[in-house]
Image (tube, helix red, strand yellow):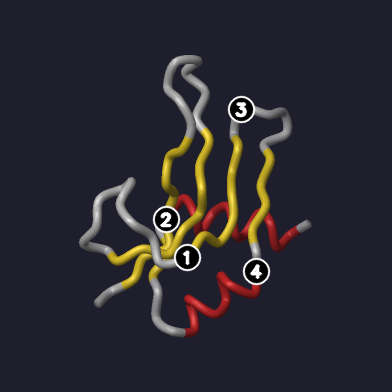
Amino acid sequence: MEVCIRLQRIGKSINKVSNYRIVAIPKSRKRDGKVLEIIGHYDPSKKPAALAVNTEKLDKWVAQGAVMSDTVRTLSKKLRKK
């Protein structure tokens, strides 16, 4: 089972504002499928964008062989620069 760390869209689409969870999920599951673990959240609608990630969980999944999506990799780099 190949695990991917990627964004999962949450919230209602009525107000056209997207909020995301950063999750560990098997690669074969759909975007909104059942996740293995929630790692953090990302809200791009706020200025500056709100980003909260549990780096211990993120590092644990990467050590186990999980692959980060391009977006999550970029967000992780921004978080670690702070």
Number of the front mark, 3 or 1: 1
Q: Which residue is mark 3?
A: 45
Residue plotted at (50% across, 15% down): 15
Closer to the camera, 76 or 46? 46
Circle 2 sits in a helix, a strand or a loop, which is it? strand
Q: Residues within 10 Å of mark 3 (few under 14, many from 20)?
A: few
Quarter holding the N terminus is: bottom left
Q: Kindly check if marks 4 and 3 are in contact, taking CB atoms under 8 A apart as contact.
A: no
Vertical comparison of 65 with 68: above or below: below
- The span from disc 3 to disc 1 (Cα, nearest Å) is 24 Å
Asked if the residues shown at circle 3 and circle 1 are in contact, with their CB atoms under 8 angstroms apart, the answer is no
Binning the other alpha carbons within 10 Å of mark 2 as few (below 14), some (14 to 19) or many (20 upward) gives many
Give the side of residue 67 with respect to residue 78, left or right: left
Residue at 50% in and 30% down = 18
User: Circle 4 — which element?
Assistant: helix
Amino acid type shown at disc 3: Ser
- Do callouts 2 and 3 mark residues in contact (Cβ within 8 Å)? no
Residue located beneath label 2 in the image: 6
Disc 4 residue type?
Thr
Q: Which mark is residue 37?
A: 1
Q: Residue drawn at (51%, 48%), measured in percent from left and top?
A: 21
The reply to whether discs 1 and 4 touch (Cβ–Cβ < 8 Å) is no
Q: Earlier in the sequence, mark 2 or mark 3?
A: 2
In the image, what residue occupies the spot 69% across and 56% down? Answer: 79
Q: Toward which corner of the image does residue 13 lie, by quadrant? A: top left
